[in-house]
Amino acid sequence: MEDTFQYQGQRRQLVEKLRERGIADENVLRAIGSVPRQFFFEPMFVNYAYADEPFSIGCGQTISQPSTVAIQSHLLDVKPNVKVLEIGTGSGYQAAVLDKMGAKVFTIERYRELYLKAKKLLAEIAPKVRCKFGDGYKGLPSFGPFDRIIITAAAPEIPEALFQQLKIGGKMVVPVNCNDGTQAMTVLEKLSETDSIKTIEGKFNFVPMLQDKVRT
Ligand code: SAH
């Protein structure tokens, strides 16, 4: 697949739409403006790549909508060379955006099919991203601790193993289930091994984060 002028134009329009929707973080907008989102879609669906909508990527999962990727990337407060752990690789798009923002990205996926596909694509367009297959609830203890952790699936709560793998002073961005079926975007700043400050940044809709079930 090619990144034609047509796609580049659609991407510029998407960035303008995100600006109109209140995304002002230039580092995020630059990254979204440089990652060819059509590469993360099935060939028959590439026409949907620049709509601000979530879209099916197979295995019953979705690529998050661009404005959600922008908000989570902004809240994650990425600085050059921060070590980021993403739970829920999916298509690999969010990982590629964080890579473009200068993060050192590790990402985990529980569906082998999605993991293999994302790993192949990211090896071409964001080769520094490290893809892992497994249960994100357990994190990646052998590669931690992390400066930042982002979960891109709906979590019933903040997984304890992930809190332990976050550095003191680090931040975690997690959509946590509310009782109305949506998720509250929760930002946690770790103050000590036991304490954190929590802020809530609006409501979202994600596919569920599932525990102890890897799909081979
Ligand atoms: N960040 C993705 C969107 C992912 S959708 C993108 O940019 O395309 C959420 C993903 O989380 C799905 O692919 C789902 O399979 C995965 N997931 C759900 N529970 C998980 C778990 N416990 N560990 C790892 N991945 C998980």
Image: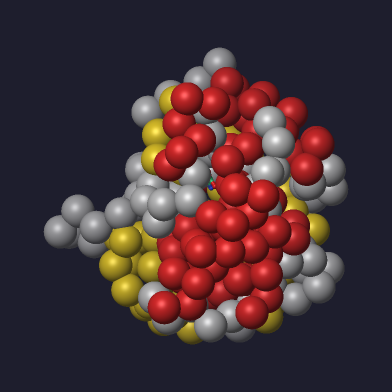
Q: Residue at x 69, y 43 (%)?
A: 3
| Left or right: 15 as drawn, with respect to 67 | right
Query: Looking at the picture, how far across and down is residue 25, in whole percent?
Result: 59, 80
Q: From this viewpoint, is residue 196 visible? A: no
Query: Looking at the picture, how far across and down is residue 52, in whole percent?
Result: 40, 56
On screen, 140 above or below 110?
below
| Left or right: 121 as drawn, with respect to 183 | right
On screen, 30 above or below 96?
below
Front in this rendered view, residue 32 or 189: 32
Q: Residue at x 57, y 21 (%)?
A: 113
Q: Residue at x 62, y 71 (%)?
A: 28
Q: Residue at x 74, y 57 (%)?
A: 99
On screen, 167 above or below 179?
below
Front in this rendered view, residue 11 or 197: 11
For the C terminus, which image quadrant? Answer: top right
Occupied quadrant, residue 73 = bottom right
Query: Looking at the picture, how far across and down is residue 126, in whole percent?
Result: 78, 46
Q: How is the image coloured?
A: secondary structure
Occupied quadrant, residue 15 = bottom right
For the N terminus, which image quadrant? Answer: top right
Furthest residue to the left? 180
